[in-house]
Amino acid sequence: MTTSQEFEDPGLFECMYNMRAMRRLKPDPVPEAMIEKILDAAVRAPSGQNTQRWAFLVVTADEGRKFFGERYRHWFRKLLGDRMPPDDDDSSPARQARAALHLADHMTEVPLLIMALGKRDWPFRVPPEERVGLAPPSYGSIFPAVQNLLLACRGLGLGASLTTVHQMFEGELREYFGIPDDYGIVATIPIGFPMGRFGPVRRDPVSSKTHRDRWGNQPPMTTVD
Amino acid sequence: MTTSQEFEDPGLFECMYNMRAMRRLKPDPVPEAMIEKILDAAVRAPSGQNTQRWAFLVVTADEGRKFFGERYRHWFRKLLGDRMPPDDDDSSPARQARAALHLADHMTEVPLLIMALGKRDWPFRVPPEERVGLAPPSYGSIFPAVQNLLLACRGLGLGASLTTVHQMFEGELREYFGIPDDYGIVATIPIGFPMGRFGPVRRDPVSSKTHRDRWGNQPPMTTVD
């Protein structure tokens, strides 16, 4: 039996169009079969020369989630400073900020954390002895896998979001989780069943982001989303 | 009418599992509705603080494709050097290398090139006057969109692959296409109808890439892909 047989296959575009960052999550544990399924989706992504230099640290143990969540909350609030929008601000960025703060304050209760890591060996053809210091991972070979993982969460009805606040305390994370120096933490994805409902993402229209044949040329587009 | 109504919605996991890099492409033009659809999928991706600092340069004009393709071929062959595997090598990397060379040699015939660009304003809160030189784009806010675009191509039956060889001649591209300094080219995606058939991607199993609660701990996985 392979994981790909255990779940219905949802619509690709349906998932993309409704993959909001879900930051209000229930503490209920995520079934192991779902954890395997979203990781199985992640590793199908492309990577430079198909080298698959990714690794995933899956954290469900109470102590690990507490260790990560407490530091995430501390650093998120420190970065936020006094920039929290007033409660009566109903703008999209304000609602987003409140949801992000909710996630930070409840991070220790999130049942599943997945850290996406990348090996620091880019460019691949530079021999280790010729490298100066630690290179960053090849982000272009990790984020496609992260996006697959996020889409798979959406497809299974799991709430998730892409976070990078771990950068503020990566050293502590490496020591606590025993992560070797030659892997960099690229993103941390908190995952759980959502409290709210999925909904369409808000984005600027394609036409406002597209240039045709030369920068500044408007595309001949007829449709607007 | 929105683009999301024009096409069938294929299976999410079906697309992920069979999204091989397709490097042998027909010269037949890609319908405008498909170009819009894949860009519409790209912009649904997440980005840091939903700032959507991406831009897409769509190239279908003969001159632009010729300009890009000739330089791509030159640099690809230069980078390849004498590392081309012998014709009787049927290993997966060897076949991949031959396909990549085929793409390079026929790049001028690829009907659609999409360059994914990112604004060089990361981290967002550093005021322009305090920036030293040009920062790279926030890759983590662009590659999820690139992956959506690649998945959308697969969903529509278009062949595509993620290339970064443009880095070798980015200066020439900027001048030719009029790209401003504050945008960096993150990836170039050559797109067309595939000569061959889509098929399952070959990847190392999830279990070989996953650590549970601490680096080195084997995950309690039961399934293998």
Image (cartoon, coloured by chain):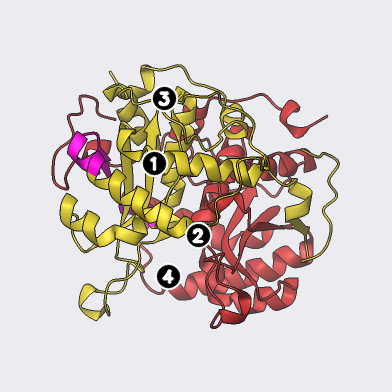
Chain colours: A yellow, B red
Query: Whole-Å distance between the Cαs marked 3 and 4?
Result: 47 Å
Mark 4 — residue? Answer: B80
Q: Nearer the viewer, residue B154 or B94?
A: B154
Mark 2 — residue? Answer: B139
Residue B219 sits in quarter? top left
Find out whether residue A110 is within the magenta segment.
Answer: no
Q: Label 2 marks which chain's residue?
A: B
Question: Which of the two labelled residues, at mark 1 and mark 3, occupies the earlier sequence position?
Answer: 1
Query: Whole-Å distance between the Cαs marked 2 and 3?
Result: 28 Å
Q: Is residue A125 toward the left or the right of residue B9 in the image?
A: left
Say how many tags the image has. 4
Task: Say what amino acid the circle numbered 4 marks.
Answer: Leu
Question: Do callouts 2 and 3 point to residues on the same chain?
Answer: no
Q: Which residues are magenta?
A: A49-66
Task: Answer above or below: position of A177 versus B119.
Answer: above
Residue B71 percent coordinates (x, y): 61, 73
Residue A16 percent coordinates (x, y): 58, 34
